[in-house]
Image (spheres, coloured by chain):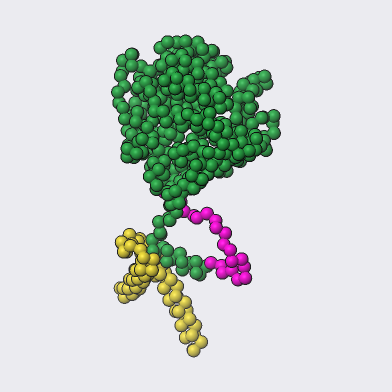
């Protein structure tokens, strides 16, 4: 099957999905960033071409670039320039683009190209802010990977510059474009699982997060995620995704956070925690209970939304009712008879029975689908560029996710309950 | 190889026994539907389960018949 044909099939499937997700005007107003997919005005002339520059072609940057390449011709997009100050990445990017894109070591040279409409930034975290601000001042729309910046002031500066320049600032929270998440959040907002009392989220990995070094002096450049100067580790790399989901579910932001963190397992000279546990409190008293660590991957990652009428595990696409559908009567009867015959009757034992988890496999939130949300968010970015604007909610979601990731880091460092500082309100 | 001949009367008897088993299974289903306040549509939707259950009951009856037959044979032998 040709790529174009496949793209069209996936796109039709996605539109079908989001029509489920945005079935009502209420849902559409809470997910305004999806409206763009309904537009079909893609001019095919050279004038209508959207020209992108990519800054930072590491693992994530490469993935983003390859995603855009899958729809370059279909959506009249061109990867016009690439930039990376690390030689292997720079060469790799030239190879990916067959030497067609202009290549730079210095992002400022890329920003100086007049006909570039937007830039995709996937550099280490501490570089996001100044590159984004420079790009916006240079008149480029910006797609920046999460989290936004290494500190709160830079995060605010990025957002303020976006407002001041009236240019797009989209942050890479791809779950906002996932059909499963869109359907799940719509159903949660429609009250399907009742009142939310708690969200439990976690991201567990069994890896040391280290990349192989060609030279020892490149340690901090390659393994930037392990050093406080460049990254907040688990907070900005992983938690930032899941706090965005929690804020989206709750339709609001937390009021406070408490957190513990430690370097508990990987005592290899790193500065960022390999083990964190936080509790965020929301205005209605509900909580996000979050933990992440790097030495055990048994539970993987998940966001469990616990409501009075049901539970959702969105990562694995599952919904569970608090009142599971009854089994057929005849099976129920056979089960009961079986229990009466084979169950052990405790004599003189403890009367307390442990409330272990209900064994119930639940239902799928969304049907199986073959769409990549990373690709969808990049497709949306190119469409926003063509429109010249993006819904503000998109930037706000990214902003508050970044801010609350950094506030959790602060809570872990100070061992205090951290509330929101009004000077960062937008 | 020796041919196994099943007489008509034997076949008839076994079919009747299986029908009794099927009747028991349906009766159990009706009882379960009433007991658990389930939908009467389960009389149709659970037919595969009922047929399976009837086979299990039939097999159980074979076991009981086998035991009864053996006991009767032992008693007859003892009387001789």
Residue at image position (65%, 23%) is: A219
In the rendered image, is residue A288 in sight?
A: no
Rendered residue at 43%/66% (across/down): A334
Can you say which quadrant of the picture contains the N terminus of chain B? bottom left
A121 vs A333: above or below: above
Measured as percent of width and height from the top left, residue A275 is found at 63, 38
**Which residue ends up furthest to the bottom in the rendered image?**
B79
Percent x, y for residue A269? Answer: 69, 29
Q: Give the range drawn in magenta.
A: A343-363
**Residue at x 65% of width, y 38% of height:** A415
Predominant SS of the magenta segment: loop
Residue A186 position in % (x across, y down): 39, 41
Compared with A12, A219 (above or below) is above
**Letter of the green chain:** A
Q: Is residue A192 above or below residue A203?
A: below
Image position of B35 with respect to A110: above or below: below
User: According to the colouring, which chain is yellow?
Assistant: B
Give the residue displayed 45% in from the left and 79% down from the top: B68
Magenta span includes A351: yes
Provide residue B43's location: percent of width, then percent of height.
32, 64
Q: How many marks?
A: 0
- A14, A388: nearer the viewer: A388
Locate residue A218: give its quadrant.
Answer: top right
Residue A166 visible to the viewer: yes
């Amino acid at each position: 099957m040709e790529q174009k044909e496949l793209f069209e099939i996936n796109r039709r499937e996605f539109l079908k999905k989001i029509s489920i997700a945005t079935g009502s005007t209420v849902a559409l107003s809470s997910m305004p960033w999806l409206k763009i997919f309904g537009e079909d005005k893609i001019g095919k002339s050279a004038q209508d071409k959207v020209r992108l520059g990519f800054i930072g072609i590491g693992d994530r940057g490469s993935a983003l670039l390859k995603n855009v390449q899958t729809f370059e011709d279909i959506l009249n997009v061109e990867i016009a320039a690439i930039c990376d100050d690390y030689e292997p990445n720079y060469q790799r990017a030239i190879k990916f683009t067959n030497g067609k894109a202009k290549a730079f070591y210095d992002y400022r040279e890329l920003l100086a190209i007049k006909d570039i409409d937007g830039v995709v930034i996937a550099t280490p975290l501490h570089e996001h802010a100044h590159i984004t601000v420079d790009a916006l001042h240079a008149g480029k729309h910006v797609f920046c990977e999460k989290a936004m910046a290494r500190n709160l002031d830079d995060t605010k500066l990025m957002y303020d510059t976006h407002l001041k320049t009236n240019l797009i600032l989209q942050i890479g929270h791809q779950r906002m474009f996932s059909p499963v998440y869109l359907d799940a959040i719509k159903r949660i907002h429609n009250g399907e699982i009742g009142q939310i009392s708690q969200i439990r989220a976690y991201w567990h990995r069994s890896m040391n997060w280290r990349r192989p070094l060609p030279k020892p002096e490149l340690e901090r450049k390659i393994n930037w995620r392990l050093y406080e100067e460049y990254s907040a580790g688990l907070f900005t790399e992983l938690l930032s995704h899941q706090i965005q989901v929690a804020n989206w579910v709750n339709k609001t932001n937390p009021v406070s956070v408490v957190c513990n963190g430690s370097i508990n397992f990987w005592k290899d000279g790193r500065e960022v925690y390999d083990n964190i546990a936080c509790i965020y409190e929301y205005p209605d008293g509900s909580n996000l209970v979050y933990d992440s660590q790097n030495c055990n991957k048994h539970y993987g990652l998940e966001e469990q939304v616990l409501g009075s009428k049901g539970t959702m595990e969105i990562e694995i696409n599952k919904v569970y009712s608090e009142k599971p559908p009854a089994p057929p009567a005849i099976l129920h009867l056979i089960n009961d008879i079986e229990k009466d015959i084979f169950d052990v009757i405790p004599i003189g034992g403890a009367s307390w029975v442990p409330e272990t988890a209900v064994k119930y496999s639940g239902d799928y939130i969304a049907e199986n689908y073959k769409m990549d949300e990373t690709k969808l968010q990049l497709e949306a970015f190119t469409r926003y560029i063509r429109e010249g604007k993006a819904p503000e909610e998109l930037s706000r979601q990214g902003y508050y996710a970044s801010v609350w990731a950094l506030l959790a880091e602060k809570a872990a460092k100070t061992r205090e309950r951290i509330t929101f500082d009004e000077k960062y309100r937008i | 190889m020796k041919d196994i001949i099943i007489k008509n009367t034997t076949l008839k008897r076994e079919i009747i026994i299986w029908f009794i088993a099927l009747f028991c299974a349906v009766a159990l289903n009706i009882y379960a539907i009433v007991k658990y306040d389930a939908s009467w549509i389960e009389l149709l939707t659970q037919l595969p389960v009922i047929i399976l259950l009837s086979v299990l009951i039939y097999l159980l009856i074979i076991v009981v018949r086998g035991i009864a037959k053996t006991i009767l044979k032992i008693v007859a032998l003892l009387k001789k």
